[in-house]
Image (cartoon, grey):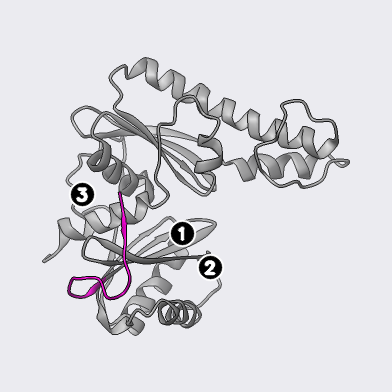
């Protein structure tokens, strides 16, 4: 769905989009409808705007992208302590006043939530992108620090979702509370029944989590029989989707796509 292009792709100016999650921050650089490049770094609340700027300018230079070409900055953040830092980053390094995805920003999508301000910005952005890419009704599963399931109904309205502990949080809880168990990589095991401790833990973590995801999606499909698509995004989307019975699409760049759409809807004020 996303066209990768070099820095010399057609189009005037660059759009910088920023998706700040609890674990990672992803920067995307759009030239028109082409994603010129994307970068991922750890989210560090203590990191200053100058530190983020130095890292980002280095990455842009490596990709042969000129920061002076940035004409707008759009930010989705679920880490409030970083909002000031990201605002200074946009102002001081790109000369732009950033647009934060927050109440009052145009999304073109009604939010049918008891308190719309409680919905994470990334969840709204993902739902908007999935609606436009795959139609409605649609469910987005985002594998981040938490795993979220977000639902857009046939009318194109965001109606709510489900929040579960992320796979890394679940695994860390096991490691922390079982003194004889140790950390293992999260991956799909070759066999269901492990013949050693590491393999047994990998099987339990992986298949247990796929069971959680498919159990929720099975219930959602029962409630939404005309569901158009289930799309997954986030760090562990591909590995979980490889064993899921209900995930039909994986779009790692879903949030970046949604942020570009937010820019289009709000361009010109």
**Mark 2 Cα within 10 Å, few/some/many (few <14, many 20+)?**
few
Q: Position of residue 235 (x, y in %)?
A: 52, 49
Residue at (51%, 47%) from the top-left corner? 144
Element under label 1?
A: loop
Q: Which is more N-terminal, label 3 or label 1?
A: 1
- Is the C-beta separation of discs 2 and 1 under 8 Å? yes
Is 7 part of what is drawn in magenta?
Answer: yes
Q: Is residue 22 above or below residue 164?
A: below
Does 196 lie within the magenta span?
no
Q: Residue furthest right?
A: 180
Q: Nearer the viewer, mark 1 or mark 3?
A: 3
Frontmost residue, 231 versus 80:
231
Vertical position of residue 81 compared to residue 248: above or below? below
* 123 relative position to 181: left or right: left
Q: Which mark is residue 122?
A: none
Q: Label 1 to label 3, Cα distance in Å? A: 20 Å
Image-quadrant location for residue 86 = bottom left
Q: Which residues are magenta?
A: 1-14
Q: Which residue is mark 1?
A: 79
Marking on residue 107: 3
The numbered mark at residue 45 is 2
Labels 2 and 3: the sequence-earlier one? 2
Residue lying furthest left: 268
- Marks 2/1: CA distance? 8 Å
Residue 2: x percent and y percent?
Answer: 31, 54
């Amino acid at each position: 769905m996303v066209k990768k292009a070099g820095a010399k792709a057609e189009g005037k100016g660059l759009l910088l989009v920023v998706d700040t999650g609890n674990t990672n921050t992803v920067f995307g650089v759009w030239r028109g409808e082409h994603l010129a490049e994307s970068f991922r770094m750890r989210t560090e609340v203590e990191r200053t705007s100058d530190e983020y700027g130095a890292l980002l300018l280095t990455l842009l230079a490596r990709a042969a992208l000129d920061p002076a070409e940035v004409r707008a900055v759009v930010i989705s953040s679920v880490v409030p302590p970083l909002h000031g830092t990201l605002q200074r980053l946009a102002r001081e390094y790109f000369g732009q006043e950033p647009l934060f995805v927050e109440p009052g920003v145009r999304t073109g999508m009604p939010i049918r939530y008891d308190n719309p301000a409680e919905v994470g910005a990334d969840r709204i952005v993902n739902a908007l992108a999935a609606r436009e890419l795959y139609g409605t009704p649609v469910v987005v599963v985002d594998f981040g620090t938490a795993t979220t399931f977000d639902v857009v109904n046939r009318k194109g309205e965001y109606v709510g979702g489900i929040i579960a502990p992320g796979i890394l949080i679940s695994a860390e809880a096991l490691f922390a509370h079982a003194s004889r168990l140790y950390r293992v990589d999260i991956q799909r095991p070759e066999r269901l029944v492990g013949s050693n401790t590491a393999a047994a833990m990998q099987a339990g973590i992986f298949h247990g989590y796929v069971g959680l995801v498919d159990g929720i999606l099975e219930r959602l499909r029962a409630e939404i029989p005309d569901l158009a698509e289930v799309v997954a995004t986030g760090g562990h989307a591909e590995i979980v989707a490889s064993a899921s019975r209900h995930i039909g699409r994986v779009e790692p760049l879903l949030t970046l796509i949604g942020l570009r759409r937010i820019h289009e809807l709000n361009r010109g004020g």
